[in-house]
Image (spheres, grey):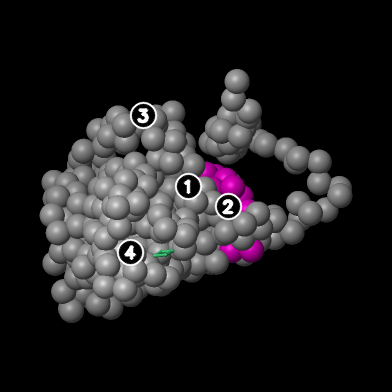
């Protein structure tokens, strides 16, 4: 997964790893994002290793075969010998990059390696409906930040699904948004999590970031924090939306990519800079507090005394549900 803001311009290219598969996302001239397996059809070299800006095409560094934004193989220099750039045995039309199915919800780019998953629009429809009160039409990318965790990705997801730890892990946040005003939400089979009845926006000198227009009083005050199974954490509040893409990096490591979007592009103006920084710092503090405890959980689970632990009936419903989905995903199919 990635976000469109990581490839903002035509020709921007981003390598991503999904389910152990090296992929590449490309934005074309029409502004559409496509996904391909990041492997050259010639000898299997990884095409792209770093994000790149405004590329005319994807050129393999090994023998310079070059692919278009649509994955078509365009050029095969010297393939037939000196000064022969074509060769009857090499049919370029059959040697394009292998596409992967991608779809976008807001700016979040999802990848379907199976090619047969339910349409993303339908999967997300209940959340789209629930959040229709937020006018996302002026949503503007603020910033991104990545965090590394020495822990399995599932523990990060499970931690996001519960608020039980709030008083002890997030004492500052708990003053504003205490445990007793948190609730759980069940939006759709793959979308569930928690909500708080009190989100207090930051501000400096009485000034606050612009809010989504025409929010009712409840939505103006609340924050909603569902996950989209398997690896997206979302958060929406009166003045911003964030997504955290949770990327496994082997069994015991994870990278979390935080992306923050503001309700309105005017939030990007210079005179909001301090308030934006305040917002980012606030979230970074909370996420670092979570990372600390998730890493401790990872270590604790290496103990031979850990027998699976206990889930509380009151707090751990969403966690239990996440575990059941994981179990279903990894179960052998017949
Ligand atoms: S491996 Fe890519 S051009 Fe040869
Ligand atoms: Fe937390």
Q: Which residues are magenta?
A: 149-162
Relative side of 110 to 194, left or right: left
Residue receiving disc 2? 153
Q: Secondary structure at mark 4?
A: loop
Residue 80 numbered mark, or none? 4
The answer to whether residue 86 of the structure is visible from this angle is: yes
Disc 3 vs disc 1: which is toward the camera?
3
Tell us which disc is closer to us: 3 or 4.
4
**Secondary structure category for the residue under label 1:** loop
Q: How far is the residue under mark 3 from the one under mark 2? A: 24 Å
Please tell me which residue lies in front, 255 or 132. Answer: 255
Residue shown at 42% from the left, 58% from the top: 42
- Which element is circle 2 on? helix
Magenta region includes residue 274: no
How many neighbours does mark 2 have within 10 angstroms: few (below 14), some (14-19), or many (20 or more)? many
Q: Is residue 154 magenta?
A: yes
Residue mark closest to the camera, 3 vs 2: 3
State the image coordinates of residue 276 (x, y, percent, origin top left).
29, 71
């Amino acid at each position: 997964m990635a976000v469109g803001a990581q490839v903002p311009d035509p020709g921007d290219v981003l390598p991503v790893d999904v389910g152990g598969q090296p992929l590449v996302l490309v934005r074309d001239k029409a502004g559409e994002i496509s996904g391909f397996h990041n492997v050259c059809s010639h000898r299997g070299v990884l095409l792209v290793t770093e994000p790149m800006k405004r590329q005319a095409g994807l050129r393999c560094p090994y023998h310079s075969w070059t692919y278009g934004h649509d994955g078509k193989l365009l050029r095969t220099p010297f393939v037939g010998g000196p000064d022969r750039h074509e060769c009857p045995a090499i049919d370029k039309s059959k040697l394009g990059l292998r596409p992967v199915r991608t779809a976008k919800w807001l700016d979040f780019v999802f990848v379907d390696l199976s090619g047969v998953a339910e349409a993303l629009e339908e999967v997300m429809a209940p959340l789209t409906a629930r959040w229709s009160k937020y006018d996302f039409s002026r949503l503007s990318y603020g910033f991104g930040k990545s965090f590394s965790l020495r822990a399995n990705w599932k523990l990060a997801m499970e931690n996001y699904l519960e608020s039980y730890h709030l008083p002890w892990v997030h004492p500052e946040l708990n003053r504003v948004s205490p445990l007793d005003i948190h609730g759980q939400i069940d939006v759709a089979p793959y979308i569930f999590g928690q909500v708080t009845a009190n989100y207090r926006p930051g501000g400096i000198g009485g000034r606050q970031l612009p809010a989504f227009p025409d929010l009712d009083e409840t939505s103006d005050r609340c924050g909603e924090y569902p996950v989209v199974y398997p690896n997206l954490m979302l958060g929406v509040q009166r003045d911003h939306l964030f997504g955290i893409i949770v990327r496994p990096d082997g069994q015991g490591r994870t990278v979390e990519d935080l992306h923050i979007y503001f309700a309105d592009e005017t939030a990007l103006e210079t005179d909001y800079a301090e308030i934006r920084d305040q917002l980012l710092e606030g979230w970074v503090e909370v996420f670092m507090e979570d990372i600390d405890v998730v890493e401790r959980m990872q270590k604790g689970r290496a103990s031979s005394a850990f027998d699976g632990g206990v889930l509380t009936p009151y707090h751990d419903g969403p966690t239990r549900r996440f575990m059941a989905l994981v179990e279903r995903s990894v179960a052998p199919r017949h």
